[in-house]
Amino acid sequence: MQYKFTRNNLCNNRAISNRKFQCQESYMKSGAYSPNRPESTLYAMSADDIPMFYDMQNLTEKQKADHDENVRLLGHQQVSLMAISKNQDYVGMYDDFKSAPFDEILNRYHALLSKIGLDMVPLDHLVYAPKDTYYDDLAKALPPVEMINLLMVSRSNEALHHNNEEMARNLNLNSKYHFAENSPSFGIPVPDTIITNQPLAGNEEAEAFFEKHNGEVILKMTGFAGGRNVAPVDDIAAAEAYLKDYIESAPVILQQRISFDYYQEWTIDLNITDTGISIDNVRRILLADGLWIGNLFHATPPLTEEQEKILINVGEYARAFGFGTSDGNNFGIDFFIGKQGEIIVTEINPRWTAGLFPSEILKVLKTDVDSVAYYDLISKDKCLEYLDYVESKLPGHSSGQFDVIPLGFMPFDVEIEGNSFVSIWSIVRGDFPAFRTEAKKRFGGQEFANADRIPI
C-alpha cells in the first residue's frame, strides 16, 4: 500500500543511533513483503501475533508472558536483518541493544557477518526504539526510505502501515479457525478437525472426537507463535486444564494428532505475488518440549513434484482470499510427510517465518551441505569468548567438518538457576554432531543445552 508519511508531523528531531533524519514529506510503501526488495527499506519487526487477535489490555497472565517472551525473541531476528538486507537499508532495533555488554556483542556480530562477505546494513543505519513502544517510536523517526517491511501487518504496527483492509485480510488468513473452516473445500489434505466451544466437559461433540481418535488429540488456540498455541491432550480433563489460561468465550480447535512414528514435520516458505507462486525454501522443523527451536535445511531438495503441487495449492488458497502483492509476500506452511510420501498440512503462516532469515543467508552463501539453524544458550560471561571461537569457524575460515554463522542474539539476560545466559541463534553448516561435541568440550557441559536436544 502507498501511504503518505509526513515527516513534519511524525519526525521528532531526536537523534537516533547518533543520526538525525531531516524532516520532509515522502511517500513509501508499507507492508509485509518478501525480502530482497530493490527499494531502500526500513525493516521493523517485533511480535505481532497476539496483538492481532486479542485486546492487549485484557490478556490473561499466560498471554502476557507469551507475548513478552515473543517480543524478546524477536531480538534475534532484528540482528539477522542486518545481514539479509542491503547497505542502503535500515533496521529497527530494541534500545536494549545499546546497553552493555549487548552493545559490544552487537558490534562483534556485525563484524563477523561482514567478514563472510554479506552485504550488511551499516551500524549507523540501526534505528533504536524501546521494545514496549517500538513501532510508535519508529513512526516518529522514520529514516529516508521508500519502503517499510514488517513481519506481518497487525494492529501492533498500525502506526507504520495504516492499512485496515490488509489488517482485516491478515486477521482471516492468520486465524486457525479460518483455515480449519475453509481448507477442506480447497482440497487441502488436513487432519480430522473440529471447532467447538467451551466448556468441553459435557460437550458431546468434543467427547465424541476424543473417543473417535482414542485420545490422540491436539488442542489449538489462535494468536500465538512458536507452538505456544498448541498442546497434545489425551482427554477432556487435560484439555480443560490447558484452557484455564484462556477466556471461556474463545472457540477451541481439536485436531487429530499426527504420529511422529510415521510422519516427519516440515515447513515451506512460498513467495506469493498477484500473478504467481514460487517455492523459496523447505526445511525440517526441530522441536524441544513441543516448542520450535530450529530448522534443518537439506542440501538436496526433499520434495517430489507431486508434493510441491499440493503445497502450491495451499498458496492458491491464500491468493483466493486476497493474499499476494506485486512486490511479493512470504507465506509459510507447516506440514507432515509420511513414510509413503503423503502430505498432511497442519498450519499456515501468512507472514515472515523464523526460518526465512537463515534461508536467505544460506542462499547468498550458495550452501551445498545440510545446515541447522537453531537457538541455544551461552553463559553471559562467556559470550565474547564464544564469538572468538565462532570467528575461527566462519565460512571460508574453517578447515574442519563444519562452519558456524552467528545469526542473531537476544539483548536480555536469560536467568536459569541463578546463572545468566545469552540466547544465541546460529547456523551450523555441515557436521552438526561434530560441532556439538567440540563446542561443549571447549566451553563446558552447562553450555549449549539445546544442542543436545537437536535430533541429529
Image (tube, helix red, strand yellow):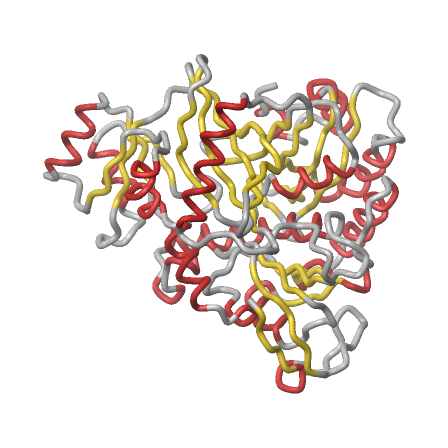
User: Going by the image, does 199 lie left or right of 245?
Assistant: left
Is 328 situated above or below 168?
Answer: above
Quadrant (top left, top right, bottom left, bottom right) of the C terminus: top right
Which quarter of the figure has residue 15? bottom right
Q: Residue 194 in the image: state x and y as whole percent.
A: 23, 37
Of residue 66 and residue 331, the one placed in the foreground of this image is: 331
Q: Residue 271 in the image: state x and y as whole percent.
A: 58, 44
Of residue 223 and residue 105, the one placed in the foreground of this image is: 223
Q: Residue at x 75, y 29 (%)?
A: 367
Q: Residue 245 in the image: state x and y as whole percent.
A: 31, 49
- Whether residue 421 is visible here, answered yes or no, is no
Q: Residue at x 82, y 53 (%)?
A: 107
Q: Residue at x 35, y 43 (%)?
A: 179
Which quarter of the figure has residue 227? top left
Which quarter of the figure has residue 3? bottom right
Is 146 situated above or below 305?
Answer: below
Q: Residue at x 58, y 49 (%)?
A: 73
